């Protein structure tokens, strides 16, 4: 959970069994070969935003089975709670031999909330390096930008390109910067995405049995022992992405602290004094 | 032969032009090369200064603007942008 807070994503390779992958792929491809990125004629149909997820895909058993997998149920409940709301879904199609890739962007419109939506990005087939799998920028999810304003950012150091086995799930914080890659292979590439809204406070929804062990009290700043324990929440929050501007690494640590305070229901949580210091006001 | 502009935008880790490049984009006015989003995982230059030393001309760098009150701890766009150009001859 701390890694999700810090980096804005979690990845679960091959978590969906191949029989489900094949059925979903067949439904997506039912409309025949496609030229554009919008799928026509697929057998996957959508729902009005705000529909309870439990009421979705009841008549689309392969997708329902995917969502009901214990691992996927655990992912969803841990992040957005019981029976979240369906926001929207999209079937992304990248035709073979594409001329270009999608600009880097953040989804929806600029969003200043602390609580968050997730986007489940599901890859029903193997995605190879040449297929232009989703490009995403770890750690970008707290940055306040609106949609395609960041189209000028062609490349950012540390950018990731999805290369994965069939049945992989990439779970994204709603704000993460991303874009479709350029499919240079001779095979079409598909990705099926569902955005989910929480309907309850996202406080301690995940297994917190190791929280006491992994979330230690304040240590001396620059204490080498503290930094050697890279599974500790506070250490995770202090590790910058390679692309963070020098002066903003600590601002991103502060962003991570603020979200963690909400998630654990503890306004006193801190990572090595970064917020406590500036909250210390003596009148 | 005609002259065309190539614009390269570099994003650096600090306001110093000799600090590491962390983001980049290139737009080739000759039409000979198209730079795709996500097409390059390593920067064309390690620093803005390195690009200058290789003949690129700086035409704009980011101003340092104080944060708007209430937004001091927010992050948004990459703050340190260097816009460079080359004028090349092409047929």
Image (spheres, rainbow, N blue to C red):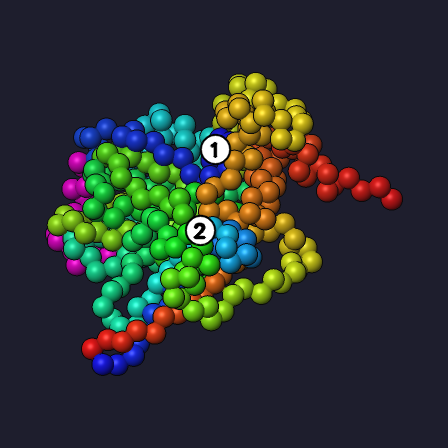
Q: Are marks 1 and 2 in contact (CB under 8 Å)?
A: no
Circle 2 — which element? Answer: strand
Q: Secondary structure at mark 1?
A: helix
* Relative side of A169 to A95, left or right: right
User: What number is the disc on residue A3?
Assistant: 1
Chain under disc 1: A
Q: Residue at x 21, y 60 (%)?
A: A99
- Quick check: is B47 in the magenta stretch? no
Answer whether residue A38 is magenta in the image: yes
Badge 2 local density, few (<14 within 10 Å), some, or many (20+)?
Answer: many
Crowd around label 1: few <14 · some 14–19 · many ≥20 (10 Å): some
Q: Residue at x 29, y 61 (%)?
A: B35
Up-down relation of residue B77 to residue A60 (above or below)? below
Where residue B24 appears, as percent x and y from the top left, is 40, 57
The answer to whether residue A152 of the structure is visible from this angle is no
- For the residue pair A152 and B7, the one nearer the viewer reads as B7
Q: CA distance from mark 1 to mark 2?
A: 22 Å
Q: Which residue is mark 2?
A: B22
Residue B48, given in percent of the width and then of the height, sits at: 45, 58
- The residue stretch that appears in magenta: A22-39
Q: Can you see residue A256?
A: yes
Look at the picture and state if B72 lies above or below A249: below
Q: Is residue A145 left or right of residue A124?
A: right
Q: Position of residue A152 (x, y in %)?
A: 40, 62
């Amino acid at each position: 959970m701390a890694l999700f807070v810090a980096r804005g994503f979690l990845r679960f390779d091959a978590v969906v069994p191949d029989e489900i992958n094949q059925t979903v792929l067949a439904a997506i491809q039912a409309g025949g070969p496609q030229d554009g990125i919008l799928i026509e004629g697929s057998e996957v149909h959508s729902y009005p935003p705000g529909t309870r997820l439990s009421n979705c895909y009841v008549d689309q058993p392969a997708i329902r089975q995917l969502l009901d997998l214990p691992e996927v149920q655990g992912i969803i409940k841990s992040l957005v709670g019981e029976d979240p709301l369906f926001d929207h879904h999209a079937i992304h199609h990248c035709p073979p031999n594409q001329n270009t890739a999608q600009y880097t962007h953040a989804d929806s419109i600029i969003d200043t909330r602390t609580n968050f939506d997730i986007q489940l990005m599901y890859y029903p087939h193997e995605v190879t390096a040449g297929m232009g799998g989703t490009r995403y920028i770890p750690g970008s999810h707290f940055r306040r930008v609106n949609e395609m304003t960041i189209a000028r950012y062609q490349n950012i150091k540390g950018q990731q390109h999805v290369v994965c086995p069939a049945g992989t799930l990439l779970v994204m914080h709603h704000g993460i910067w991303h874009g479709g890659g350029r499919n240079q292979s001779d095979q079409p590439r598909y990705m099926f995405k569902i955005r989910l809204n929480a309907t309850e406070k996202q406080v301690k929804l995940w297994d917190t049995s190791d929280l006491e062990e992994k979330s230690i009290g304040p240590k001396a700043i620059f204490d080498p022992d503290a930094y050697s324990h890279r599974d500790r929440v506070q250490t995770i929050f202090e590790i910058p992405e390679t692309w963070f501007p020098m002066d903003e690494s600590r601002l991103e640590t502060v962003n991570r602290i603020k979200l963690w305070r909400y998630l654990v229901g503890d306004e006193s949580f801190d990572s090595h004094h970064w917020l406590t210091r500036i909250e210390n006001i003596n009148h | 032969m005609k002259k065309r502009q190539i614009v390269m935008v570099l994003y650096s880790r600090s306001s110093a032009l000799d600090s590491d490049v962390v983001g980049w984009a290139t737009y080739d006015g000759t039409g000979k090369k198209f730079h795709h989003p996500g097409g390059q995982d390593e920067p064309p230059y390690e620093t803005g200064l390195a690009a200058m030393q290789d003949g690129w001309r700086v035409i704009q760098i980011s101003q340092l603007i104080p944060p708007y009150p209430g937004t001091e701890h927010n992050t948004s766009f990459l703050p340190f942008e260097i816009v460079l150009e080359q004028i090349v001859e092409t047929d």
